[in-house]
Image (cartoon, rainbow, N blue to C red):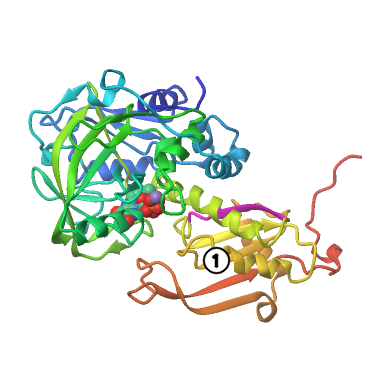
Amino acid sequence: MNGPFRDLRSWLGYLEHHGSLRRLRGPLDLRYDVPRLLEEHDGSAAVVFEDVDERQSSVLVGGTLHSRAQVAQALGVEAEDLLSTYLRALSEPVAPREVGAAEAPVLEVEEPEVRLDRLPAPWHHARDSGRYITASIAIVRDPSTGTQNWSIHRLQINDERRAGALILPRHLGHIFAQYEARGQDLPVAFVVGLPPGYLLASQAITAFGIDEATIAGALLGEAVPMVRSPRYDIAVPAPAEQLFEGRVLANVRGPEGPFGEFPRTYGPRGEKPVVEIDAHYHRHDPYFQTILPASREHLLLGAIPREAATFRAVRHVSPNVRDVVLTFGGGCRYHAVVQMAPRIAGEAKNVLLAAFSGANEIKRVVVVDEDIDVNDASDVEWAISNRVQPQRDIVIVEGALGSQLDPSAASDGVTGKWGIDATIPVGGDRSRYERVRTPRRP
Ligand SMILES: Cc1cc2nc3c(=O)[nH]c(=O)nc-3n(C[C@H](O)[C@H](O)[C@H](O)COP(=O)(O)O)c2cc1C
Ligand SMILES: [Mn+2]
């Protein structure tokens, strides 16, 4: 059984076969049991909650990936090829193919009424404002080009049919603004229950107008099957577990948040857009997927596309870059480590500066030599401790745009940024920096 995995079920089957999935039976509280269990298994196993809540027909699942190695397995590639696989998907997209309703598992069952309040959506963190849908991909069509856009947005369940959404100013926000300016609701399809390849594609950092379905196709090695949604005619992934069709309401705002977010801090309560759901379809015996915010799953989904974008940016400056990692300690957003083999004086500093253009949230960049393990925080610290002279190697920039969720930044996200060049100076006496090794027999 090898990847790429083209639906959630086959991916869960793979995880179970490899001892990376735990099944829990019996009722469990969506607020006081489920999130804690997801947290306890974060980094070791996916958790399937067989019958978490008797009002619900869906089987809840969370924690479906927790390492870069697993992401690679989900795509059917070697772990060391993950970055290059993602880069290739960006440069060689694969258009989706359309299938009929009869070939679309997601349309197997239509619910007679929409009941968001009956979904097994957890109350993820203590100060959250309520139960949230966290793993749904919102798919919308741009009216000017007809191209579709995918992105994940947290949804606060307000009642049977309405949810509050956080729509940061990216592609969905841009499309919604066009509808709202005309006083029209924006039709949207939310799909829930997909394997890592689809989720990763939804997180791609691309120019406006790129259909993330084409990146999913490239990551999975074949055109992804898409079916037209019955009510709003939006193409949606046919193998998804669940589909919710609805509208982002024009000129309506309602309270949303606070909500525990990726940096392990809360995003504040505010007046946010409201979504109304009109129809609900699903597979037979559907899974309902949740992503515990700030879990490895959440962080990795953001990390890999940002690592690819940052790698591209630094490659413009130097051909000698080997690897880019966004660390777990920095929420896979704020702290980047770049590995390179500098050949000319100053090259590492230019790479350091270029890395900030990979993603706005990057706040600190450390550049290390090839002998440093970028996935080992202790090894990176070793490089800093042995190879850095602060006055020479630290760069500080004031007043740049970072993350609004960084509590140390201004409320609009304006922050200082810093870089550390932890490479051995080009032309320096390298023997002074040599790492000790125990003797080996010749
Ligand atoms: C689990 C998860 C939850 C997310 N929640 C939100 C959210 O609530 N609001 C938001 O604007 N972006 C959220 N994101 C990030 C966007 O989905 C991501 O930046 C996406 O690439 C944006 O797509 P776009 O470039 O087409 O605008 C989330 C990402 C993940 C992985
Ligand atoms: Mn997009």
At 21% from the left and 59% from the top, the residue drawn is: 127
- Residue located beneath label 1 in the image: 356
Q: In the rendered view, tell whether residue 44 sits above or below residue 325.
A: above
The residue positioned farthest toward the front in the image shown: 144
**Image x and y of residue 414, in percent:** 41, 75
Q: In the rendered view, tell whether residue 190 sits above or below residue 96.
A: below
Q: Nearer the viewer, residue 43 or 10?
A: 10
Quadrant in which the C terminus is drawn: top right
Q: Position of residue 224 (x, y in %)?
A: 42, 30
Say whether residue 360 is visible: yes
Magenta span includes 324: yes
- Judging depth in this view, the residue of 251 and 110 nearest the camera is 251
Q: Position of residue 50 (x, y in %)?
A: 24, 27
Say if disc 1 is inside 8 Å of ligand 1: no
Q: Amino acid at mark 1?
A: Phe
- The quarter of the picture where residue 367 lies is bottom right
- 253 displayed left or right of 414: left
**Viewed as shown, does residue 95 lie left or right of 39?**
right
Q: Is residue 69 magenta?
A: no
Please tell me how many numbered marks the rendered image carries: 1
Does 103 appear above or below 181?
above
Secondary structure type for disc 1: loop
Which residue is located at x 41 percent, y 38 percent? Answer: 213
Stretch of the chain drawn in magenta: 320-328
